[in-house]
Image (spheres, rainbow, N blue to C red):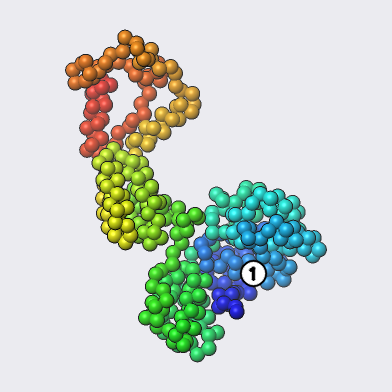
């Protein structure tokens, strides 16, 4: 039995919803079809926004022989068969889903035929191809990013689907609700519509849909780019002191039940972005993590929200990471030198600071050739102002 999402798959580019930057009068994919000349391309973007539909529409409009493979589930023999098919017909559109997972053996088989145009590759991926796809494949393809679909885009597709479902009874409110739940994923929206249609005798209301699914779909795959984009957005929001955005991205990660990633990223933020401006944040974060571990979800959301809000509203300083990176950069360049002789074990010339007033005595600690190096550049906040005062006194500065 064919599912609704496959039944409604567009056969022409003009039936694709969204992606106006690629499809439409004067746009690149439309012009390629118009000129009947397709090159190898990679389409990337979130799930359910039209990658497979565009690939099939291109194939349909150009009326070329087409084969569909999956980079992981299709065997090496399947790729070899595609090459033989391409040789027989003279050319072939080869659509490869999850192309970022294609191993080297399969790549090596395909490369010469992509190179000479016998195979026109359409690669599909949810991952950023600049990071995840082998450069040898990437350099032979034009890369196009698909944009997220709006709620109105999703509703357009849902209304088309309703025209194909006999005796359907659904109001605008229910369509709005299904579109909202999908978070821009057409496939998810159509699947929910279809399940609702057959579950409730063709009569669909918001309350009926809630019986099937009340959780919005969002892209937070733990092993793919979307997940790391959310983590990155969380860090940037805390760094930028936007408490509302901080709570939003934290909620998305909590909804994905990925506590380990939350713990790791908040720990990084505590020392990279807040650092010496509020050195007590580290121990408080560890206490929040410990509490979260003890109570588990859903209660773990409470200590995590509390510490995330405090981190977003905390003063910020990145002076520690700048200091260590500058020191590492000197080491990588060979700017090291020997440890001063008086600091070596057992050397009586070493002055023991605890034997002097205020536990400090002036002596050189850096190697001779970098003795004037300055790595720590304090920020202007209350705590670092005090640290800087001590720092200057020890350097004999005013």
Q: Position of residue 196 (x, y in %)?
A: 46, 80
Q: Mark 1: which secondary structure?
A: helix
At a point 42% along the width and 76% down the height, the residue shown is 212
Residue 90's place in the image compared with 128, above or below, is: below
Residue 170's place in the image compared with 257, above or below, is: below
At a point 34% along the width and 12% down the height, the residue shown is 346
The answer to whether 29 appears left or right of 84 in the picture is left
* Identity of the residue furthest to the top in this view: 348
* Identity of the residue furthest to the left in this view: 357
Q: Would you call the spot at circle 1 few (<14 residues within 10 Å), some (14-19), or many (20 or more)? A: many
At a point 36% along the width and 26% down the height, the residue shown is 374
Residue 233 visible somewhere in the drawing = no
* Identity of the residue furthest to the front in this view: 294
Residue 78's place in the image compared with 374, above or below, is: below
Q: Position of residue 147 (x, y in %)?
A: 51, 63
Position of the C terminus by quadrant: top left
Nearer to the camera, 141 or 308: 308
Q: Position of residue 379 (x, y in %)?
A: 29, 36
Q: Position of residue 266 (x, y in %)?
A: 35, 48
What residue sits right under mark 1 in the picture? Answer: 56
At a point 46% along the width and 23% down the height, the residue shown is 335
């Amino acid at each position: 039995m064919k599912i609704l999402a496959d039944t409604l798959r567009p056969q022409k580019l003009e039936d694709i919803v969204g992606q106006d930057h690629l499809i439409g009068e004067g746009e690149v994919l439309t012009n390629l079809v118009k000129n009947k000349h397709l090159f190898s391309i990679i389409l990337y973007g979130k799930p359910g926004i039209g990658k497979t539909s565009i690939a099939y529409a291109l194939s349909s409009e150009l009326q070329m022989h087409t084969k569909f493979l999956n980079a992981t589930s299709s065997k090496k023999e399947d790729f070899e068969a595609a090459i033989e098919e391409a040789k027989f017909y003279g050319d072939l559109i080869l659509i490869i889903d999850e192309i970022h997972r294609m191993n080297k053996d399969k790549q090596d088989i395909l490369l010469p035929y992509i190179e000479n145009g016998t195979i026109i590759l359409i690669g599909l991926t949810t991952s950023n191809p600049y990071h995840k796809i082998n450069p040898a494949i990437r350099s032979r393809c034009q890369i196009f990013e698909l944009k997220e679909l709006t709620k109105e885009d999703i509703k357009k597709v849902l209304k088309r689907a309703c025209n194909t479902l006999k005796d359907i009874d659904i109001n605008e409110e229910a369509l709005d609700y299904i579109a909202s739940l999908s978070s821009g994923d057409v496939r998810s929206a159509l699947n929910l519509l279809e399940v609702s249609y057959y579950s409730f005798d063709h009569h669909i209301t918001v309350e009926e849909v809630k019986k099937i699914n009340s959780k919005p779909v969002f892209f937070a795959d733990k092993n793919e780019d979307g997940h790391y984009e959310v983590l990155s957005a969380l860090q940037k929001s805390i760094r930028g002191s936007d408490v509302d955005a901080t709570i939003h991205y934290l909620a998305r990660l909590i909804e994905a039940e990925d506590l380990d990633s939350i713990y790791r990223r908040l720990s990084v933020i505590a020392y990279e972005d807040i650092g010496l401006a509020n050195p007590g944040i580290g121990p408080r974060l560890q206490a929040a993590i410990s509490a979260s571990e003890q109570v588990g979800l859903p209660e773990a959301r409470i200590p995590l929200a509390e510490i995330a809000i405090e981190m977003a509203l905390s003063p910020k300083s990145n002076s520690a990471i700048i200091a260590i990176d500058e020191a590492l950069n000197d080491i990588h360049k060979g700017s090291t030198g020997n440890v001063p002789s008086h600091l070596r074990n057992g050397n009586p010339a070493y002055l023991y600071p605890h034997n002097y007033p205020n536990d400090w005595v002036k002596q050189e600690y850096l190697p001779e050739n970098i003795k004037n190096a300055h790595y720590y550049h304090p920020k202007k906040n209350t705590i670092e102002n005090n640290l800087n005062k001590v720092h200057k006194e020890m350097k004999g500065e005013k």
